[in-house]
Image (cartoon, coloured by chain):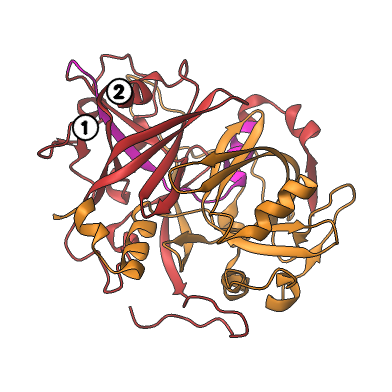
Chain colours: A red, B orange
């Protein structure tokens, strides 16, 4: 195998190192986060550093980069307490990726990249109309990560909107059927193909494929 | 679209709700985390709630469930400060999934599920020999998440081991070539297919596919 020590990696060109470290973790749940500020200015940005924290309460976290580098999403969330997370599908990868450009604070990325803001009753932040899997969150806590000035933004899932026909009989959501993509590194987008689902594992029993969904 | 409020979701059967909430986030970077305790007892467990925190310093986080539910990994990391994260490939999905069974603390999951512990000089925790993308981490901080008694375990990447031929000329690691799988929900495993990589996005310029890698 090839071996790379952190001291060697630290000496690399910044762009090369960014690609390497960002793809080391493997596939990521890339999504668009929609927010709005007190003036009604909408913001839409692509995030892949999203992590499931728990199912009950239903908590999701995402990493917001340092505020100087990525101010709009976190500042809007602090103002309204509401944000939306929307899956990216093969049909609009280019538009989703384009939201990563450093637009001015008064730019509405929805209009600029050509995606449709969708407002739902009782929820302040805009969803992405093109997305087949959308969920709305209420801010729970922003945890500062002192080691690199990032933030773990934790939210409670409060609203879920899914296209018809995506929920299987045991509650599993068929993201492949929805055309959801996975990401790798900072710029790679992938389709997926199911290998198998497995039964709940128990000691002393061989792994079994789940074939009843 | 179908709408589900959190109050409706809370009323569902626990297993149905777990499948639903765990798959809502989309694809996850499923990997095996290898640890060891002060007696030399090895532990191997599958995790999918892994999140990139930053490239320089190279920080990765993962969510450890409440200590009562998942004690071994976090306790070993506290003891040695070292742990390994190893990609799961199509060739050993069943063995990787089987590590999620609730084994007794004196069970060595490597031997039990049939994966090979691989020790590297100067690093305490075992890597997974079958994995083509392996990295070693030094514990930086364990952040308690009070809302559900989980923990964000933050580590610094210190060692990276990759099969030959996986790093592209701009530093991107070709996880698809390595046979790395993505996961969905608590039990679904997927292969991937590259759609495209995109250039760094800039305001006022249409998104461009990257074709020079």
Across and down, in percent, residue A101 comes to 39, 24
**In-image side of A54 versus B83 (left or right):** left
Within-10-Å neighbours for mark 2: few <14, some 14–19, many 20+: many
Mark identifier at residue B160: none
How many numbered discs?
A: 2
Closer to the chain start, of discs 2 and 1, is 2
Q: Which residues are magenta?
A: A17-39
Residue B32 seen in this snapshot:
no
Which quadrant holds the N terminus of chain B?
A: bottom left
Is B92 included in the stretch rendered in magenta?
Answer: no
**Whether marks 2 and 1 lie on the same chain:** yes
Which quadrant holds the C terminus of chain B?
A: top right
**Inter-mark Cα distance, 2 to 1:** 9 Å
Check disc 2 and report the residue beneath it.
Answer: A76
Chain ID of residue with mark 2:
A
Residue that protrudes farthest toward the right in the picture: B121
Across and down, in percent, residue B163 comes to 73, 56
Q: Disc 1 on helix, strand or loop?
A: loop
The residue positioned 21% from the left and 53% from the top of the image is B7
The residue positioned 9% from the left and 39% from the top of the image is A121
User: In front here: B160 or B102?
Assistant: B102
The residue positioned 47% from the left and 40% from the top of the image is A49
Chain ID of residue with mark 1:
A
Residue A148 picture quarter: top right
Check disc 1 and report the residue beneath it.
Answer: A125
**In-image side of A166 versus B164 (left or right):** left
Instruction: Examine the rendered structure and indicate whether residue B95 appears above or below residue B80.
Output: below
User: In front here: A199 or B149?
Assistant: B149
Q: Disc 2 on helix, strand or loop?
A: helix
Mark 2 near mark 1, Cβ–Cβ under 8 Å? yes
Instruction: Examine the rendered structure and indicate whether residue A120 appears above or below residue A168.
Output: above
């Amino acid at each position: 195998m090839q071996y790379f020590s952190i001291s060697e990696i630290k000496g690399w060109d910044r762009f090369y190192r960014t690609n390497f470290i960002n793809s080391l973790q493997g596939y990521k749940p890339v999504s668009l986060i929609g927010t709005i500020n007190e003036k009604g200015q909408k913001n839409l940005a692509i995030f892949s550093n999203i992590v499931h924290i728990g199912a009950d309460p239903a908590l999701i976290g995402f990493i917001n980069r340092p505020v100087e580098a990525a101010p709009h999403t976190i500042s809007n969330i602090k103002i309204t307490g509401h944000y939306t997370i929307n899956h990216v599908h093969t049909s609009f990868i280019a538009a989703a990726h384009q939201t990563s450009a450093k637009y001015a604070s008064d730019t509405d990325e929805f209009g600029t990249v050509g995606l449709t803001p969708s407002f739902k009753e009782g929820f302040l932040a805009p969803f992405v109309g093109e997305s087949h899997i959308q969920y709305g969150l209420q801010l729970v806590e922003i945890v500062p990560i002192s080691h690199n000035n990032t933030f773990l933004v934790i939210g409670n899932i409060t609203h879920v909107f899914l296209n018809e026909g995506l929920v299987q009989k045991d509650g599993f959501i068929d993201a492949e059927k929805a055309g959801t993509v996975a990401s790798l590194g900072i710029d790679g987008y992938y389709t997926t193909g199911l290998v198998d689902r497995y039964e709940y594992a128990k000691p002393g029993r061989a792994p079994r494929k789940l074939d009843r969904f």
